[in-house]
Image (cartoon, helix red, strand yellow):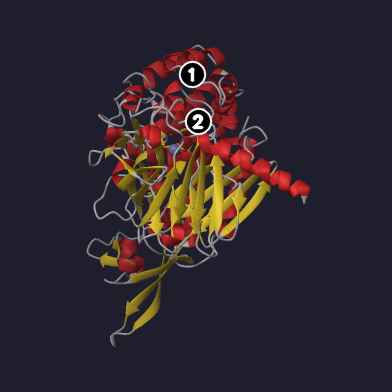
C-alpha cells in the first residue's frame, strides 16, 4: 500500500509539472458531428500578454498551401475561471491573436474535416483529414491541432475518447490506453504533425522484419478485411527494400495507413518519418496490390530523402511561410526512381516493366510539363509560380535519377551508383544535420566524381534537355523515339471499350485480309484472346504483348459474344493463322542492345544497373 501511495504522489508531481509546460489536447470522437468535432486544449503557461495561436499554412511533403486555419470555427479562449478572453481573427486566416494571455488556461474550437467540404479547398486528401462519425477518423494532425508561435518545441499530449471497438493506428505508441481512450505524447509540434492516426474498427496486420515492426491498417467502406493481404505485399516489398538499403531498415516501427474511402479525384499518399497515409478510392484487390506496392515503395523510400538527407529548408520547417529547397529532384525524384528500380532489381517486376515505367515518364514529362525549366528553379517556387509543374517531380525527377544512376555506374565501371551515393549522403548528413542548398552539388561531386557536378549543373540546375539516348546507351540499352515496327495484324477492326469494360467491335469497314478471315461482326464482344480473358483497357496491352511473340504459322483465336438471329447471345470462336503485317509507331521505346554488341564497360554498367552491384 505504501509503495502504491508513494507512486501515486510521484505520478501527480509529474503530471502537474507537465501541465505547466505542455499542450494538453482532448478530442471526444464519440461526440463528433457528421464531419466535425470539438477540440479542447489546456494551454501551456504563457509569458506574454498577446499570443498567436496558429494552424499550418503549409506542411512538409506537400509543396502547396493547405491553410488549415480555414477548417477551424468558433475558437474561444478562457482563463482558469472559465471567463472568455479577447480573440482577434480574420476569417480564413491561419492564426488567432489572443489578448490577456498571461491568464490563458484553455482554448476550444470546432474543426471540420477537409474530405467533406462542399467547396474544394485544394487540400491534398493525403495531407487532409476525414471525419465520418461512427465510421472513420483520419487524423492528420496539422488539420486538427494548432500551436503557439515560438512555442513549437514544447511537449504535446493528445487524448482521444474513442467509440467502442475502435482502434487508433499510428506509428505512435499510446502512453496510456483503455477501451474508451488513448493518450499520445510527443516532444514537439513537429513530431505531432509527423504522426497521422487513423481511428476505425480494426483491420490491421503486422509483420516483423529484423528489428523493424511494420503495421498495416486499412479502412474500406465495403467491410472487407484487406490488411492481411496488404501486409504480405509489404513484407515482400520491404524485404527487397532492406537489401536495397544495404541489409537493414533504419527504423524500429513503421505504419502504413490506408483509407480507401476517398471519393475525391485526387488520390495519393503522404510520407512521414515513421509512417505514411494513403487517401485512395475503393478498388478491386487485384489492382490494389500492384498499385499499392508502387506507391507504398515510394512513400517508404522517403525515410531516406528527404527524411534522412535534406537541406535546412526542409529540416527547420516553417509552417506559416514556405521556404522551399531547390532539390525536389532529390527528395521526390530519386524516391520515385528508387521505388521502381527496387522492384526491378529484386524481381517484383521485370526489366520490361521497368523500361515501360521509364518511357511512360519520358512521355509524360514531354507532354505535360516544361522540359527546359531548370528543376532547381521550379523546386524553389513550386508552391507559387510553378505550381502546375509540380507533377514533373515524379516524371523528369525520376528520369534525372535514372540517368544519374547510370552515369555514376558508367564512371565507376559498375561499382558506384545512386544507391551508394544516397547511402554516403545519409552518413554525411543524417537526421541531425542538413546541407546548404547551394553546396549540394559540390558535396555530391566530392563523394562521387567531379564529372557529376557538370551533369547536375546541365540537367538539374540548367535548362538542357537530357539526352536519354546517350545515357541509356551507357547501360547497353537502345532508346528510340517514334520507332516504327512491323507486327502481325489482328485484322484492323475498330475496337472500343464500352461501359462495364466490354471490349466491343465497333468498326468492320477497314478490315484487312486477316480481319476478313477472322470474320468479325459489328457489336461482337471480345471475351478472350488465345485463352486470355479480355477486359477493359488492359485489352490493348494484352494484344501488344501477344503479338510481340507471334511467329509465322501461329494462330489467333478469339472467343466473342454475338447475338444470333433470335437476339440471344451466344459464344463464337473466330480463328485464323496470323499472316498480314502492319506497321505501328511507338513514341518512346527502350530495348536491350544485343549482348554481343556491348563493350565490357556497357556490360558491367547494365549488369550493375539491372541486376545489382
Ligand atoms: Zn513523394
Q: Tell me if residue 454 comes above or below residue 552 in the rendering.
A: above
Ligand 1 placement by image quarter: top left
Residue, disc 1: 435
The location of residue 281, given as percent across then percent down, is 40, 57
The location of residue 420, given as percent across then percent down, is 59, 25
Q: Nearer the viewer, residue 81 or 111?
A: 81
Would the CB of label 2 be found within 8 Å of ligand 1? no
| Few, some or many residues within 10 Å of mark 2 (<14, 14–19, 20+) | many
| Mark 2 residue element | loop
* Among the 4 quarters of the image, the one containing residue 328: top left
Cα distance in 3D space between marks 1 and 2: 12 Å
251 relative position to 561: left or right: right
Q: Nearer the viewer, residue 514 or 215?
A: 215
Q: Which of the image's four quarters has the C terminus?
A: top right
Residue, disc 2: 305
Say which of marks 1 and 2 sits in front: 1
User: What residue is at 61 percent from the left and 50 percent from the top?
Assistant: 176
Q: Nearer the viewer, residue 537 or 225?
A: 225
The location of residue 430, given as percent across then percent down, is 57, 24
| Few, some or many residues within 10 Å of mark 1 (<14, 14–19, 20+) | some
| Mark 1 residue element | loop
Would the CB of label 1 be found within 8 Å of ligand 1? no
The residue most toward the front is 81
Q: How many marks?
A: 2
The location of residue 200, given as percent across then percent down, is 50, 60
* Among the 4 quarters of the image, the one containing residue 53: top left
Amino acid at each position: 500500500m505504501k509503495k502504491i501511495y508513494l507512486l501515486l504522489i510521484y505520478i501527480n508531481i509529474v503530471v502537474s509539472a507537465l501541465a505547466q509546460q505542455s499542450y494538453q489536447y482532448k478530442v471526444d470522437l464519440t461526440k463528433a458531428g457528421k464531419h466535425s468535432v470539438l477540440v479542447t486544449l489546456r494551454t501551456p503557461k504563457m509569458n506574454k500578454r498577446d499570443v498567436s495561436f496558429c494552424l499550418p499554412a503549409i506542411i512538409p511533403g506537400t509543396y502547396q498551401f493547405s491553410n488549415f486555419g480555414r477548417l477551424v470555427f468558433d475558437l474561444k479562449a478562457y482563463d482558469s475561471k472559465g471567463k472568455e478572453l479577447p480573440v482577434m481573427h480574420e476569417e480564413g486566416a491561419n492564426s488567432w491573436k489572443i489578448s490577456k494571455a498571461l491568464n490563458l488556461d484553455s482554448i476550444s474550437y470546432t474543426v471540420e474535416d477537409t474530405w467533406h467540404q462542399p467547396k474544394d479547398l485544394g487540400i491534398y486528401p493525403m495531407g487532409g483529414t476525414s471525419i465520418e462519425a461512427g465510421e472513420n477518423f483520419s487524423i492528420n494532425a496539422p488539420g486538427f491541432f494548432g500551436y503557439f508561435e515560438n512555442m513549437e518545441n514544447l511537449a504535446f499530449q493528445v487524448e482521444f475518447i474513442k467509440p467502442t471497438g475502435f482502434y487508433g493506428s499510428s506509428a505512435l505508441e499510446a502512453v496510456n490506453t483503455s477501451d474508451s481512450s488513448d493518450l499520445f505524447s510527443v516532444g514537439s509540434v513537429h513530431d505531432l504533425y509527423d504522426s497521422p492516426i487513423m481511428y476505425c474498427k480494426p483491420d490491421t496486420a503486422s509483420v516483423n522484419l529484423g528489428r523493424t515492426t511494420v503495421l498495416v491498417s486499412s479502412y474500406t467502406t465495403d467491410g472487407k478485411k484487406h490488411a492481411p493481404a496488404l501486409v504480405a505485399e509489404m513484407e515482400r516489398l520491404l524485404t527487397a527494400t532492406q537489401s536495397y538499403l544495404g541489409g537493414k531498415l533504419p527504423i524500429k516501427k513503421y505504419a502504413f495507413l490506408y483509407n480507401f474511402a476517398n471519393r475525391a479525384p485526387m488520390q495519393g499518399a503522404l510520407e512521414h518519418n515513421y509512417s505514411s497515409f494513403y487517401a485512395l478510392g475503393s478498388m478491386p484487390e487485384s489492382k490494389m496490390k500492384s498499385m499499392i506496392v508502387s506507391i507504398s515503395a515510394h512513400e517508404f523510400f522517403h525515410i531516406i530523402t528527404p527524411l534522412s538527407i535534406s537541406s535546412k529548408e526542409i529540416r527547420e520547417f516553417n509552417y506559416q511561410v514556405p521556404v522551399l529547397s531547390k532539390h525536389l529532384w532529390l527528395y521526390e525524384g530519386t524516391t520515385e526512381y528508387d521505388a521502381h528500380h527496387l522492384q526491378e532489381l529484386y524481381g517484383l517486376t521485370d526489366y520490361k516493366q521497368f523500361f515501360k515505367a521509364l518511357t511512360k515518364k519520358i512521355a509524360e514529362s514531354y507532354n505535360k510539363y516544361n522540359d527546359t525549366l531548370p528543376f532547381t528553379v521550379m523546386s524553389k517556387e513550386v508552391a507559387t509560380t510553378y505550381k502546375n509543374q509540380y507533377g514533373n517531380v515524379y516524371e523528369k525527377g525520376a528520369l534525372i535519377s535514372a540517368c544519374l544512376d547510370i552515369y555514376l555506374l558508367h564512371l565507376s565501371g559498375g561499382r558506384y551508383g545512386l544507391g551508394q551515393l544516397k547511402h554516403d549522403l545519409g552518413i554525411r548528413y543524417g537526421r541531425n544535420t542538413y546541407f546548404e542548398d547551394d553546396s549540394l552539388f559540390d558535396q555530391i561531386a566530392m563523394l562521387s566524381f567531379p564529372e557529376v557536378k557538370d551533369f547536375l549543373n546541365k540537367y538539374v540546375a540548367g535548362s538542357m534537355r537530357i539526352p536519354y539516348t546517350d545515357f541509356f546507351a551507357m547501360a547497353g540499352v537502345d532508346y528510340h523515339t517514334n520507332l516504327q515496327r512491323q507486327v502481325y495484324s489482328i485484322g484492323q477492326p475498330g475496337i472500343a471499350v464500352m461501359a462495364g469494360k466490354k471490349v466491343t467491335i465497333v468498326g468492320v469497314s477497314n478490315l484487312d485480309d486477316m480481319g476478313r478471315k477472322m470474320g468479325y461482326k459489328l457489336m461482337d464482344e471480345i471475351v478472350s484472346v488465345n485463352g486470355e480473358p479480355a477486359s477493359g483497357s488492359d485489352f490493348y496491352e494484352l494484344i501488344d504483348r501477344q503479338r510481340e511473340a507471334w511467329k509465322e504459322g501461329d494462330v489467333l483465336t478469339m472467343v466473342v459474344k454475338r447475338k444470333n438471329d433470335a437476339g440471344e447471345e451466344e459464344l463464337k470462336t473466330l480463328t485464323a493463322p496470323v499472316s498480314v503485317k502492319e506497321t505501328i509507331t511507338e513514341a518512346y521505346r527502350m530495348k536491350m542492345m544485343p549482348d554481343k554488341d556491348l563493350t565490357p564497360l556497357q556490360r558491367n554498367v547494365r549488369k550493375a544497373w539491372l541486376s545489382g552491384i
